[in-house]
Image (tube, rainbow, N blue to C red):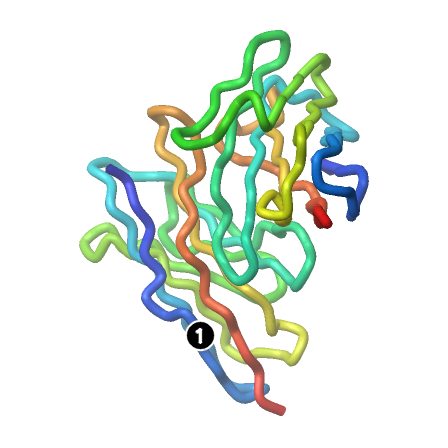
Amino acid sequence: AQSVTQPDIHITVSEGASLELRCNYSYGATPYLFWYVQSPGQGLQLLLKYFSGDTLVQGIKGFEAEFKRSQSSFNLRKPSVHWSDAAEYFCAVVTNRDDKIIFGKGTRLHILP
Amino acid sequence: GAVVSQHPSWVICKSGTSVKIECRSLDFQATTMFWYRQFPKQSLMLMATSNEGSKATYEQGVEKDKFLINHASLTLSTLTVTSAHPEDSSFYICSARDMQRSSYEQYFGPGTRLTVT
């Protein structure tokens, strides 16, 4: 069965520091991959997505992610975080079998001033 | 573009009553909408897939008689929580697929906070 693993439940970084959030997926073929961000009490906002092509994907708010097939990973990065980046981040995968989104458990990002 | 709204954004109801949550795609048509439930500090759990003009498909363990889903038009799906109990208190989020665009991307609503007293 398809699955998404986000190994870090919480991550704390200082404002201005770089960030990497990890995501691994389990699927036989190349999946469609997403990163979403959720602020408290809010819905989900799409940061970026990967369907095919260039494995380095640029998103909104200065985020990027790299698809590595050999590692079954799709890690999210940002070179310099801002206090407003504090939120919950979800990695997700869609397989073309049933078009359902499978979410990881999420990583809560805390920013130190 | 690709905006999804939900109404209400929050609702408090008494145990035993029913509450309806609306999900609308504002600037696109959605043949398929999805309903998720999210408990505090947890991920989203898919409850059901709603297809316009047909019955919803529920995930295993979701009571279809308790969570009634209607997708009467290409821009509106409703979730009715019947005979609500405190354990139904949760954050409910809907999403929609734009039938004219990528078939795999879902656009999410802002969510509805349901509190059952």
User: Residue B33: x and y, percent?
Assistant: 60, 26
User: Residue B27: x and y, percent?
Assistant: 77, 29
- Seen from this angle, which residue lies furthest front? B16
In the picture provided, is A112 more to the left or to the right than A72?
right
Q: Is residue B108 above or below residue A66?
A: above
Instruction: Identify the residue shown where x is 36% and y is 27%.
Output: A96
Considering the numbered disc 1 on the image, is that residue within a helix, a strand or a loop?
strand
In the picture provided, is A73 more to the left or to the right than B4?
left
- Seen from this angle, which residue lies furthest bottom? A113
In the picture provided, is A88 more to the left or to the right than A30?
right
Residue B85 picture quarter? top right
- Seen from this angle, which residue lies furthest top? B53
**Quick one: quadrant of the N terminus of chain B?**
top right
Task: Give the number of callouts.
Answer: 1
Q: Is residue B93 above or below residue A75?
A: above
User: Residue A1: x and y, percent?
Assistant: 24, 37
Q: Is residue B40 above or below residue B38?
A: below
Which of the chains bears the disc numbered 1? A
In the picture provided, is B20 more to the left or to the right than B36?
right
- Amino acid type, label 1: His
Residue B101 picture quarter? top right
Instruction: Identify the residue shown where x is 70% and y is 16%.
Output: B74
Q: Is residue B80 above or below residue A64?
A: above
Instruction: Identify the residue shown where x is 24% and y is 46%.
Output: A26
Instruction: Identify the residue shown where x is 58% and y is 47%.
Output: B87
User: Residue B46: x and y, percent?
Assistant: 48, 37
Q: Nearer the viewer, residue A68 or B110?
A: B110
Residue at label 1? A10
For disc 1, the neighbor class at 10 Å (few under 14, some 14 to 19, many from 20) is few
